[in-house]
Amino acid sequence: MTALLSALVATTRPDSPGPAGTMLQESRGYVAGWGTLALINAGLAQGKNRSGLNWFLLSLLMGPFATFILVALCENLPGPGAKADKPVAEAKRGQ
């Protein structure tokens, strides 16, 4: 009877390896990977002068598909300090 009780306690402890414990560890790995990918996508988006927060949130929902969209389909946007073809002062002088 004691052996049966100790075996039962060993299988129901949360730190004991078993099917439920293994699945929980695997899901933690997926969550960590998904979150890391979202952070990487936010950095990629900021490098292309896009909103890092928006792409982080989008990446949490779409994962690798958001990475593909960001890398393959999105071009770099001009930065806030980018100059136009003709500065405003030159355009006014030419008129």
Image (cartoon, helix red, strand yellow):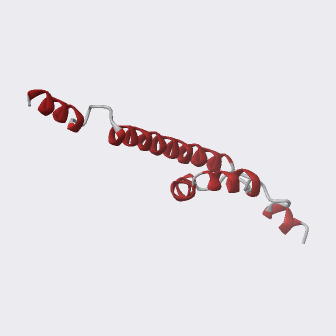
- Image position of 80 with respect to 94: above or below: above
Residue at 56% x, 54% y: name it: 59
> Which of the 4 quarters of the picture holds residue 70?
bottom right
Drawn side of residue 12 relative to residue 63, left or right: left
Question: Outermost residue, bottom direction?
Answer: 95
Q: Is residue 42 above or below residue 3?
A: below
Q: Residue at x 13, y 27 (%)?
A: 3
Residue 40 visible at all: yes
Q: Which is more toward the observer, 68 or 52? A: 68
Q: Quadrant of residue 6?
A: top left
Residue furthest top as drawn:
3
Would you say residue 75 is visible in this rendering? no
Please state if 11 lies on the left or on the right of 1 as rendered: right
Residue 30 to residue 91: above or below: above
Name the residue rendered at 56%, 44% in the picture. 37
Q: Which quarter of the figure is the C terminus placed in? A: bottom right
- Given residues 31 and 19, the one toward you in this image is 19
Nearest the viewer among 88 and 78 is: 78
Residue 28: x percent and y percent? 41, 41
Residue at image position (57%, 58%) is 62
Question: Residue 19: horizontal and vertical position, in percent?
Answer: 36, 40
65 left or right, relative to 86: left
Quarter of the picture containing the N terminus is top left
